[in-house]
Amino acid sequence: MWILPLVGYLGSIVGFCFLTLAIASGLYYLSELVEEHTVIAKRLLTKLIYSIIGLQLILWLVDGFPFGLTLMGVVSHVIYLGNMRRFPFVRLTDPLFIVSCVLVLVNHYFWFQHFSEAQQRSYSRLSSMYDQPDVPSFTEIASYFGLCVWLIPFALFVSLSASDNVLPTIGTEQPSRNDGKNKRQGMVKVIVDNVLSAIGEVTRLAGWKKPEDRF
């Protein structure tokens, strides 16, 4: 068969493009919701951080998760909590924000290393092919990563704003005028708008789109 594999590759590419657009649209909508309900979003994120810290401590006490990695996860979420002091305003050069971004990668690496080594040790102890390895399933590992490693950084990325033009609230450094022109925008909206603008500029330079046409 020659044509069917090509159809499979084409379908995979189209499906990936639609999935990417769906995720971008969902993040854009969530960012708008946070802009409209900032107080509720801050309260929800704060409670969510405390809940995940409690969950990590329970996993350490009951399921015997490693103390060092658990402590690193708890400290990371305490640092994530520090980003809430000026929520939803954030400066990309803020040391606390930079440390939070680094901790996301560090947590992912060490927890991935932990589960990989646990699986290797469990499979090496099997005496026969009929023995069942005592390791977490893929669903359990994915759920832990989704809730305890990625959820809060992902929620902060969607919720935080990248513009300096914020309304005067507690914790802001420079209140600005609400004249209808300067408006706080979420980081996701800024990124999506910049990507669309870049694509529109490329298509205009390539002659595929007239300057007066909207992308």
Image: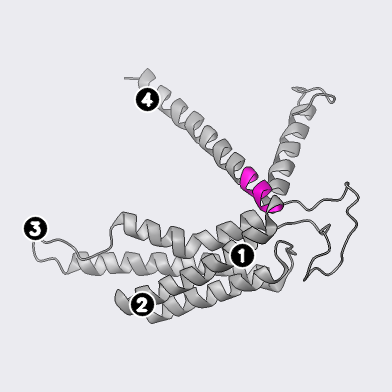
Q: CA distance from mark 2 to mark 4?
A: 47 Å
Tell me the amino acid under the disc marked 1: Arg
- State the image coordinates of residue 39 (x, y, percent, origin top left): 68, 61
Circle 4 is placed at which residue position?
A: 5
Name which of mark 3 and mark 2 comes first in the sequence. 2
Tell me the amino acid under the disc marked 4: Pro
**At numbered mark 4, what does the secondary structure look like: helix, strand or loop?**
helix
**At numbered mark 3, what does the secondary structure look like: helix, strand or loop?**
loop
Are dots 2 and 1 in contact, CB under 8 Å? no
Q: In this figure, what is the number of numbered marks?
A: 4
**Which numbered disc covers residue 70?**
none
Circle 2 is placed at which residue position?
A: 60
Q: For the residues carrying marks 4 and 1, which lies nearer the camera in this image? A: 1
Q: CA distance from mark 4 to mark 3?
A: 37 Å
Name which of mark 2 and mark 1 comes first in the sequence. 1
Q: Is residue 31 magenta?
A: yes
Name which of mark 4 and mark 3 comes first in the sequence. 4
Name which of mark 4 and mark 1 comes first in the sequence. 4
Name which of mark 2 and mark 4 comes first in the sequence. 4
Q: For the residues carrying marks 4 and 3, which lies nearer the camera in this image? A: 3
Residue located 57% across and 75% down the image:
78
Name which of mark 1 and mark 3 comes first in the sequence. 1
**At numbered mark 2, what does the secondary structure look like: helix, strand or loop?**
helix
Q: CA distance from mark 4 to mark 1?
A: 50 Å
Tell me the amino acid under the disc marked 3: Tyr
Q: Quadrant of the N terminus?
A: top left
Are dots 1 and 3 in contact, CB under 8 Å? no
**Which numbered disc covers residue 130?**
3
Q: Nearer the viewer, residue 110 or 135?
A: 135
